[in-house]
Image (tube, rainbow, N blue to C red):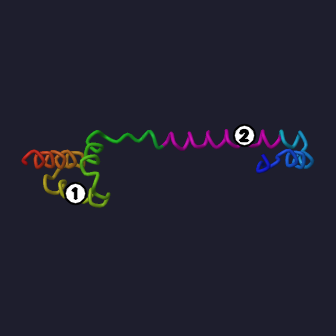
Amino acid sequence: MQDEFPIGPILILVGDFIDKETGFGLLVGIFVGLLAYFAVSKLIGYGRSTKVTPAVERQFRNVFAIMDEGRRQSLIRYYMEKFECNREDAMRRAVEERQRDANRW
């Protein structure tokens, strides 16, 4: 029991410096600050969540997840030039070719 730190004297000292109005003001300020933080984070997060990635792009990223972003973009450009198609078709063809290669063995 002697190892315990007495907290009573600390509370008395803090109580001498901060009266009830100041303590209440601090609590209200913290509450308003947290409320503003969460409101702003929801507004910022809302803008990000509206961007929906197509299913083809999600599948492409899952299949080629081991590659870094630059390599994936290079692969998309390669298939766009090879088949003269748009970005989504290039991703679809890359996934299909990868699946064909995986099924050969």
Q: Residue furthest right?
A: 16
Helix, strand or loop status at disc 1: helix
Residue 30 colored magenta? Answer: yes
Towards the viewer: 40 or 98: 98
**Residue type (three-letter) at the residue carrying disc 2:** Val
Q: In this view, does 21 lie to the left or right of 85?
A: right
Question: Residue, x 27% and y 56% (percent of image)?
Answer: 72
Q: How far apart are marks 1 and 2 (CA)?
A: 49 Å
Mark 2 sits on what residue?
32
Answer with mark 1 or mark 2, whichever residue precedes in sequence.
2
Question: What is the quadrant of residue 55 in the picture?
Answer: top left
**Residue type (three-letter) at the residue carrying disc 1:** Leu
Query: Residue 90 placed where, x, y %?
Result: 20, 49
Residue interval drawn in magenta? 25-47
Helix, strand or loop status at disc 2: helix
Question: What is the quadrant of residue 33 in the picture?
Answer: top right
Q: Overall secondary structure of the magenta stretch?
A: helix
Q: Which mark is residue 75?
A: 1
Residue 43 colored magenta? Answer: yes
